Structure formats: structure tokens, C-alpha cells
Image (cartoon, rainbow, N blue to C red):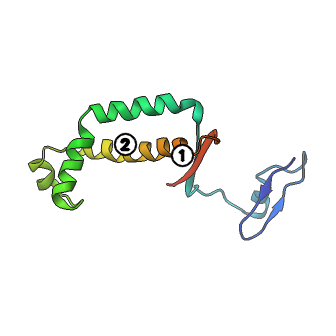
Amino acid sequence: MGRYYNGDIDGKFMFAVQPSNAGERFFARETEPEYIEYEISRDNYSEIVEELDKIKASGSVDRVQDMFDKTDYGWNDTIQKENGVNDEDIREYADYQLGMKIKVWFDENPEENYLNFMAEI
């Protein structure tokens, strides 16, 4: 076992001897990560479906989709107001799209127990 480092230089920290922050001795500074790594377990499939159903039942998805159907996916505050769509509806619609991608991935990959993805910060 051991921990690796990679980037412009690659290597492995000496097992049980060298801490992960050893680079600080040579004036390395910790930076903010650019990505968040996510893992979703198939064990949560029923909760994923429940959350999708809850979003769908709110009407947000249908309201936003109806607006997009009329505007070729363009919108602004005026178009939102004319279609009875608020900012929360747009957020719910966006989350629903992500949730559906997750559900479909599990549906199409029955042998996989985990879905992993990275999101830019």
C-alpha cells in the first residue's frame, strides 16, 4: 500500500514514513481542488427514483419543458414570467436532468454497483 502523487512530477510517498504534506517542506502550498469526486451506490437506487418522482410531482419539470418547447431552450426573466416558471423551477428541472442520467446509467449497467463522476467546482 501507499499513497501516490502525480502531476508535473509523479511518485509514491514512502510507506509509513512520509506524510502527504511532505511537499510543504519544499514550499509547496495547498490549493483549492478543481473538482469534487462523487460516488453513488446502487443501494440508493430506490431513493434516487423517489427523489425524481418528487421533483416530477412538483410540476417544475413540465413547466420548464413547456417553456423550452416554445422557445428552443432559450429564456430570460420575461419569458419565465410569461410561462409561469420561477428560478426554483429551473433548478429543479436541471437537477431532474442530472438525476435521470444517474438512474438511466444504473438501468443500463446492471452489473455495476457504483457510479462515479467528477464535477468542476
* Residue 13 image position (x, y, % from top left): 85, 55
Tell me the quarter of the picture where residue 34 sits. Answer: bottom right
Q: Closer to the camera, 36 or 110? A: 110
Label 1: element kind: helix
78 to the left or right of 102: left
In this rendering, the answer to whether 76 lies above or below 114 is: below
Label 2: element kind: helix
* Residue 117 image position (x, y, % from top left): 56, 50
**Which one is earlier in the sequence, the residue at label 1 or at label 2?**
2
- Residue bearing mark 2: 96
What residue sits 11% from the left and 55% below the top? 78
Which amino acid type is marked by label 1?
Glu
Which amino acid type is marked by label 2?
Tyr
26 to the left or right of 85: right
What residue sits 85% from the left and 49% below the top? 2
Question: How far, Cα to Cα, is label 1 from label 2?
Answer: 18 Å
- Which numbered mark, 1 or 2, is in the foreground of this view? 1
Q: Look at the numbered discs 1 and 2 and tell me whether their residues touch, using CB distance below 8 Å.
A: no
- Residue bearing mark 1: 108
Dot 1, crowdedness within 10 Å: few (<14), some or many (≥20)? few
What residue sits 86% from the left and 51% below the top? 18
